[in-house]
Amino acid sequence: MQEPFVLPKLGIVVLMLAGLLQLPSPTPPTSPFVVQPYLQLGDLSNLSPVEPVRLLWQAPSDSGGKWAVDVRQGEADSWRPAVAVDGRLIPGDSPYRLFNVSLTRLRPGTEFDYRVSKDGVVVFSARGKSRSAVDQPYRFVVTGDTGADTPQERRVVHQIYRARPDFFAVAGDIVYSTGRMIEYRQKYFPVYNADTASPETGAPLIRSRLSFASVGNHDAGTSDLTRDPDGQAYYLNWSLPLNGPYGQAGLPNTQILKGPPEALKTHLGLLRSAFPRMANFSLDYGNSHWTFIDSNTYVDWSDAYLRNWLARDLASAKAAVWKFVVFHHPPFNSSRAHFTEQQMRLVSDIFEHRGVDVVFAGHVHNYQRTKPLKFLAKPAPDRTFKSAGSYVIDGDFEIDDTFDGSTDTTPDGVLYIVTGAGGAGAYDPDQTDNTPTWQPFTQKLISDTYSLTLVDVEGRLLRLRQVTENGDEIDRITITKPNSLKDSTLSQKPNGR
Ligand SMILES: [Fe+2]
């Protein structure tokens, strides 16, 4: 990731012109943005023959003016306009305009420049990157439980930026504490889209790289439209594939919203087709397939329809070398915190049968890595998998005790990573290296520092590292597949690439 452009904002341009014309310096104008531009993948259901990337931002509702977006791929390329730039009005106590613009005709796996203009003046520019092509190596970061407006969140985001990933994913609890738009504006966008990169500010990350996310309990933290009319902001702020199993509000296994009928109708109209569809989705990136699913307790993953959707989605990724799944509540967790919330164990068998390599979760605010494992849930005598109010799932384990990620790099089973140390207060720090407190399936547990998961994929070789808020490496494993690149130069490249 290159250093982002110095932003030729409206104020800078005006000040330069004033200097040239020997005019007195005008008062710097205010930013034209409520939320500065950032990249998203968008919906893949209407796939054009070119790589999709979308640019989103928010502006004041009364700002008026003519907006434009131009894109180019390389400095030899000429700027070309995006197809249409039109913000839709989001009403409410603080109305604003939400822009979601398609950046057209991008090549896979390449960087591109873009600039946003208002009334003919460039007000924002940055350099982004499209999804990697199937044969390209790539680097990604996963973190979770992040948007808490803490110094640790900003330091973790700075480390993500320093790692120069091709994209990153959030394993839920994107913002605290109820997933409202106002919380995104205070705790997520200013940090993940900061103008400068530093441990104190965060970094200009989401303007330059794609990001994906699953819905955590705090992202679905309000269903009361009377109290929180700007709730469910996930479905406005993220623009992700709309290929999930549920397309209609009010269905089982979706979040049920409450409020006066008219307010409910208005709210659902604003969220459009994203709610509840975008709670579950999948996408391909390079040689990998990614499935993001909703692990909140309003979802019953023993439901046959839902299980079939997940199994079919994973089975459809026949060409993928790697399969990754992301959700919020970890099925295998050794922390005392959230220990009984094991509802996602119900789909472990699907992960095993469909060849999932690594599952990433958050919710528990620390780092944990399991041994490769297989698990089959045992139903209770009443043939259900959990009693009322309890999410403890009993079952049979098969654990691979020989995989160590260095001498044995071929796991027999699924690896489960908890990477919930992204900024919200750490859980159970005394359990770090305190193995007697761990479950038999746990290989590593570090809960006395904030951290992120950094993964390099090159063909059939994967290297996973856990990096702290200060840049220190605290865990490292390698996973290889049959016919792996034994002489890979992965570890010899500059910057570990
Ligand atoms: Fe959580």
Image: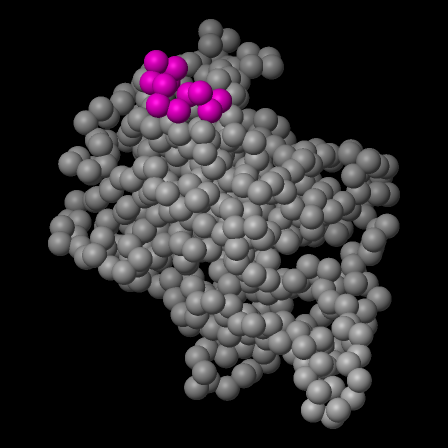
- Of 321 and 122, nearer the camera is 122
Magenta segment boundaries in residue numbering: 428-438
- Of 99 and 140, nearer the camera is 140
Q: Position of residue 426 (x, y in %)?
A: 52, 30
Which residue is found at the position 41% from the left and 58% from the top? 164
Which residue is found at the position 38% from the left and 27% from the top? 445
Residue 300's image quarter?
A: top right
Q: Is residue 108 magenta?
A: no
In-image side of 21 versus 43 (left or right): right
Location of residue 91 with respect to 82 vertically, above or below: above
- Of 129 and 346, nearer the camera is 129
Q: Position of residue 36 (x, y in %)?
A: 65, 62
Which residue is found at the position 17% from the left and 49% from the top? 484
Residue 15's image quarter?
A: bottom right
In-image side of 118 versus 44 (left or right): right
Where the C terminus falls, by quadrant? bottom left
Q: How many marks?
A: 0
- Of 257 and 362, nearer the camera is 362
Location of residue 211 with respect to 343 vertically, above or below: below
Q: Position of residue 465 (x, y in %)?
A: 33, 43
Regarding residue 326, the answer to whether it shows in the image is no
Where the N terminus falls, by quadrant? bottom left
In-image side of 215 versus 260 (left or right): left
